[in-house]
Image (spheres, rainbow, N blue to C red):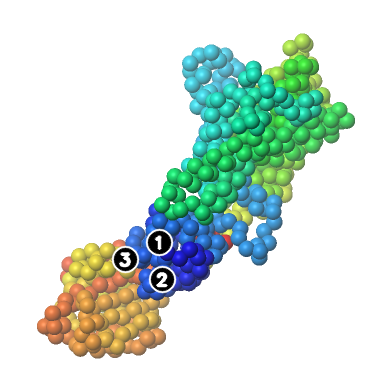
Amino acid sequence: MAKNYEALAKTILQDVGGRDNVNSVAHCTTRLRFKLKNIKKANDDDLKDTDGVVTVVKAAGQYQVVIGNEVADVYEAVLKEGKLAGGGEVPDDYGEDDDTRFIDKAIALISGIFQDILGPLSAGGIIKGLVVMCAAFGWLSTTSGAYQILYAIGDSIFYFLPIFLGVTTARRFRMNQFIGLAIGAVLTYPSIVAFTTSKTVLGALFKGTAFASEIHTSFFGIPVVTMNYTSTVLPVIAAVWFGSVIEHWANRWVPTVIKTFIVPVVTMVITLPVTLIVIGPITTWVGDAIGATMSAVYGFSPIFAGIVMGAVWQVLVIFGVHWGIVAVTTADLATLGYDPILGLTCMVCYAQIGVVLAIIRQTKDQNLKKNAIGAFFSGLFGVTEPSIYGVTLPRKVPFILSCIGGAVSGGIIGAFGSRLYMLPSMGIFAIPAYANPKGMDTMQMIGVVVAGVIAFIVGFALQILFGKKYVDQEYNEKQAKKAELVDQEVVKGTKLVSPLDGTVMPLAEVKDEVFSSGAMGQGVAVEPTNGLLRAPADGKMVMTFATGHAVGMKSNDGAEILIHIGMDTVNLQGKGFETLVQKGQEVKAGDPLVKFDIDAIKEAGYTVTTPIVITNSKEYGQVRQVAFGEVKTGDKILDLEPLEEDQLDQDVAAQAQLS
């Protein structure tokens, strides 16, 4: 096979009807699987003759180009050449003409990575919050089996977050998803986590600074700065990105026959040591730097520090670098008995859910409303990831408004001088952590409560006043596209009448695999008793043949109708047929289209079973046979039902897959 994948990809795209004819493309072990807008535009014969293409198969609504063992390489070349998205994913940004801003790309990337796990995140947050609440009210003992099991159910997705993110990040970077999963699993592997508490210390880096890091092990003599990566975000995302680069590089030179196992070996053996030695520590030190900076800012002004911390906290959470603040808090609690820094952020969650509640009121998108309600209840217990990644961040301005509300909450906590005296829980259950065990400071506690209430009000009010137009932008665009589809003739419901006198039969009973399989489209067949074919609907003739054996028309309601008189009757070269219409001619239901001699056709050894096929069946919700047995010309035989709401959504989504 030719190794010039770019040239092969260009040829394939050209012969499937061009990039604009492609809705989506994916691949399996041997085949490129295209979903085409119009399968008739594909050039089967040229594709089959192309060096590097084994054959072409049309099945299950897909146009399948069989490549063989090198399909993954050809697939990558097709994506790049056509600027397409694979497997129904959001398109990656190719090409120099893409003027999308970096911040928009980053937001789309982060939101996309978290999108598939929002449900479990919401569930985990709600369960965890309820369990903590039960313990706080004395309904469950923290040493009981029930508490520990339920807490594990709620906390597991957060603890093993790198594993989940390994899969979803790999999908975004078009990497083997199970390699991404393996990268996340290694970062949370017990012995890797255990290094952080090992009593064996081989040395330390940056002693006496905010970046002080102990070295507990080495890799072939190279010191490894051990970090705890459970519940982190940025390290695994950076690691999977690096791994995708290595995997794509390995795919280019590893021989095809051993790619299946050698490429994963090469990818993991290079990616994971580099992650543990370089990527992980660097991303962790970013958090440490933020923690040290905020400590200095607090010394300058607690109120200003509160405003800054409240404003940026959710941004730090997005990238998973907020753990540097937690590290500072742990150190302060150990040495001072209290910490003022992390305490500035504990009510930010209520600004976030204030915005979310406003969005629940404002949105017309029922899917968004459903997700936002779950995110709201999760946020009540302090778990805002579902709110951030699934609701506010993708819409940008609502997220910014929540950061403003967070800044207000942080400033209030700073003004009251509220401090943490233990590591806090989540949301409302963080309030007890502000109680000084040496003597209750009522004003500190009041400050925290006031901050939470005002943050909620500010977030809600800002979204109501300034954020509404940003809530349903994407939804409104989809609705507009759906309206366009509804306005197109192809999605309007219609009814077709029988073009013949005779007996109706299901298309599956036609003794021809092309028709009976539904590959050409859905419909019915008629065994005619007279030799005059009439129009089944009002419309225009779009296809006639000199042989007279078939005609094609498009109804005024958009149905593309193929009527084929008999099987293999093209071989009669027009004998026994007389075409009564011309291509482009307007016709009314019942107008004569073709005369044919039933006896002559049968004497020549051919059947006259006549399929009536809707070749654009996929643009309808259902093509339903409504007549059975004997019919007369003009009797209703097919009901073409319009697309349902979810099918329209799928059509819009398919169109959106093109970059």
> Residue 284 appears at what percent x and percent y?
69, 34
* Spatial CA span between label 1 and label 2: 10 Å
* Spatial CA span between label 3 and label 2: 24 Å
Task: Mark 1 or mark 3: name the one nearer the start of the chain.
Answer: 1
Residue 519, labelled with which disc? 3
- Relative height, residue 53 to residue 253 (above, below): below
Residue 536, labelled with which disc? none
Task: Specify few, some or many for label 1: CA neighbours under 10 Å numbering under 14, 14-19, or 20 or more.
Answer: many
Residue under label 2? 50
Task: Mark 1 or mark 2: name the one nearer the start of the chain.
Answer: 2
Q: For this rendering, which residue is in front, 397 or 96?
A: 96
Quarter holding the N terminus is bottom left
Q: For this rendering, which residue is in front, 120 or 505?
A: 120
In this rendering, does residue 172 appear at all?
A: no
Q: Write the residue at 52% across / 61% down.
A: 77
* Spatial CA span between label 1 and label 3: 22 Å
Q: Write the residue at 66% across / 65% down.
A: 97
In this picture, residue 62 sits left or right of residue 532: right
Q: Secondary structure at mark 3?
A: loop
> Residue 234 appears at what percent x and percent y?
64, 39
Q: Amino acid at mark 3?
A: Ala
